[in-house]
Amino acid sequence: MRFPSNMHLFNRFLIPALIILNLLLSCSKDSTKPEEENLNPDIPGDSYKPVPPPATGPLRPSLAVEPGPSNNPARIKLTVGGLLGPGGAPIAYNTDNLTIVEDGVVKGFKLTLGQAAGLKADIVFVIDNTGSMGGAIAGVRASVLNFLNAIRNSGQDIQVGLVAFNDNIPPAANTGVDPADTRAHAAVYSFHNLTAAYEQASAIYQQIATLPATGGGDTPELCFGGLDYARRTFSWRIGAQRIYIVITDATSWGKNYPIPNTKGIDADYFTDISLSDSLRSEGSVVHCFCPDNKSSLLASEYNVRPLATLTGGTWTLFSNTLDLTSLPIIGVTTASGLVEFVKNGPAGTTKERTVRVVVETEENGTVTNGESVINTTF
């Protein structure tokens, strides 16, 4: 009786077994393969270039993150707000002058510009309406309304809101602010949450058109409290740029004000730096029309200008004839970019992440850079 050779056994039994095992392993591998590789073929893979060092320049774009949809949770949308270059013209974003870093990993990304990006912005006016604004309030009202008309006619997806801040509002005043919110109640004269309805017949348009200048008293006002109220309570849209326009002829009260007091200021109240840090961590940019310097050496008085400097906004010296349309906000929002990338790790894992955007541009041989960081969950 002749037995098959070892080679014959290998060919007859082992090879088919290896083929079946390989098929099983392949099926198993495909079943656990992240779907993001199949769902997002238009997004380049992550880069293995070194993480850029901290950029200390003045370029600080606003950031807004929109988590991926339920059918593609790995695909993250990041709005990078437009910026002005050293020459005053908006920076044209591209994949060379932007670097996106998620939790220390340099990301490959897709960049979309212009109307195809479908970007949106939420803009809040934070207006001083104390008595000292009496000589300027008519001009402020007219300028803000002109600005509303301009952004409405721009065709962009923009919502607007309003906070009129004052100083030491009485606890019994019917401002619409919860009296238990002592920081805000003492500061907020009136407000309107974010809305897409700001045509001439709208409530917010009429509220601005009739805003008086009244109250106040001492020189600094409660700008920080009014701005913080919008930051904490307004209905900011996911994925929308957060832009504040602050208009004041005075400085702001802040931390180190004597306690107790009726201004809602406590031991943990804001400084210009701490409020700017909170705003930047949310991806916000503040544009300021305000004085340049403090009016005293009081430790509790703060200039408002650093809010613009530290968040990447613009600063304009306050005057009775200010013109908001001179702000490059419409051009800047148009120059914003939509960045899309695939998040680190499994698509179904949701956790807090740090996203860092570094911008570096060269103009006439001069290199300017900067960065913004946002902590968010997706």
Image (cartoon, grey):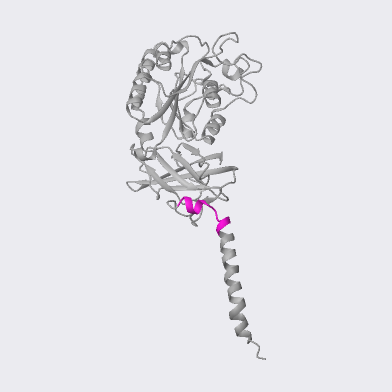
Which quadrant would the N terminus be assigned to in this image? Answer: bottom right
Residue extending farthest to the bottom is: 1
- Can residue 86 be seen from the camera position used here? no
**As rendered, which of 127 and 256 lies closer to the eye?**
127
**As rendered, which of 68 and 145 lies closer to the eye?**
68
Relative height, residue 20 to residue 100 (above, below) = below
31 in the magenta segment: yes
Question: Residue shown at 35%/25% (left/top)?
Answer: 152
Q: Give x and y (percent) for residue 314.
A: 41, 31
- Can residue 370 be seen from the camera position used here? yes
**As rendered, which of 112 and 331 lies closer to the eye?**
112
Magenta stretch: give its range.
Answer: 30-40
Relative height, residue 124 to residue 202 (above, below) = below
75 in the magenta segment: no
In this rendering, the count of numbered labels is 0
Which quadrant would the C terminus be assigned to in this image? Answer: top right
Residue extending farthest to the front is: 1
| Magenta stretch: dominant secondary structure | helix
Relative height, residue 215 to residue 8 (above, below) = above
**As rendered, which of 30 and 141 lies closer to the eye?**
30
Question: Residue shown at 50%/35% (left/top)?
Answer: 283
Q: Give x and y (percent) for residue 125.
A: 44, 22
Q: Give x and y (percent) for residue 373.
A: 52, 41
In the picture, measured across the screen, residue 184 lies left or right of residue 359, that is right
Q: Give x and y (percent) for residue 162.
A: 46, 20
Question: Residue shown at 53%/27% (left/top)?
Answer: 231
Quarter-wise, where is residue 16 in the image?
A: bottom right
